[in-house]
Amino acid sequence: MDTLKYLSGYPEHLLARVRQLIDEDRLGTMLANRYDQPNTVRNDAQLYDYVQALKDRHLRKSVPLGKVVYDSKLQVMKHALGTHTAISRVHGGRLKASREIRIATVFRDAPADFLKMIVVHELAHMREAEHNKAFYQLCTHMEADYHQLEFDLRLYLTHLDLTRR
């Protein structure tokens, strides 16, 4: 099984450094030192308030959120860490749209910065459906260190996989 499956596409010199950290058993320590702020968003109500606050700060004119929840099945079934869906329902002669964000429960216990990164990612999908240049510009507008957090999140997921074996 590939131990660096979350890091595919990164340059070989970075992968070599990650392998070295794994071989020296320092990956977890490095991440713990860098991300020592624990996540305080423990339930769905707190998650909704957290996401809504970020949305209000950066995406005021976008459509309202209908639902924001931690989803325990998300990582296993959909191979994703978060999802953003738009649900349209017909009510009489009107079409009612609702936006829903689901976050994998792995983020309930993850450092606070990783939760923020995945929430920023899903909120950016409210404006940009594809992972294109405009999408990543929006992500870095909401979180200046977005790209570093995304890379470190991939390291964190790699570390979790290694400790579960």
Image (cartoon, rainbow, N blue to C red):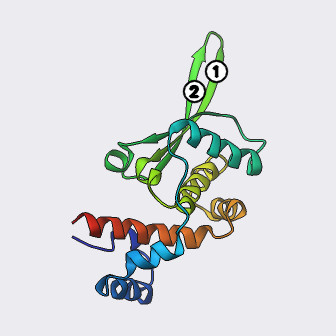
Relative height, residue 57 to residue 16 (above, below): above
- 86 or 34, nearer to the observer: 34
Q: How far apart, in angstroms, are the residues tagged by discs 1 and 2? A: 7 Å
Q: From where the camera sits, is residue 68 visible? A: no
The residue at the point 52 percent across, 37 percent down is 44
Q: Quadrant of the image for the N terminus?
A: bottom left
**Mark 2, residues whose alpha carbon is within 10 Å: few (<14), some, or many (≥20)?**
few
Number of numbered callouts drawn: 2
Residue type at mark 2? Ser
Relative height, residue 105 to residue 19 (above, below): above
Provide the residue designation for mark 1.
Answer: 95
Do the CB atoms of the residues marked 1 and 2 lie less than 8 Å apart? yes
Q: Residue 88 placed where, x, y %?
A: 57, 27
| Number of the label disc, if any, that sits on residue 88 | 2
Residue type at mark 1? Leu
* N-terminal label among 1 and 2: 2
**Mark 1, residues whose alpha carbon is within 10 Å: few (<14), some, or many (≥20)?**
few
The residue at the point 21 percent across, 66 percent down is 165
Left or right: 13 as drawn, with respect to 38: left
Q: Residue 82 placed where, x, y %?
A: 48, 49
| Number of the label disc, if any, that sits on residue 85 | none
Relative height, residue 155 to residue 44 (above, below): below
Left or right: 32 as drawn, with respect to 37: left
The residue at the point 55 percent across, 47 percent down is 41
Is label 1 in a helix, a strand or a loop? strand
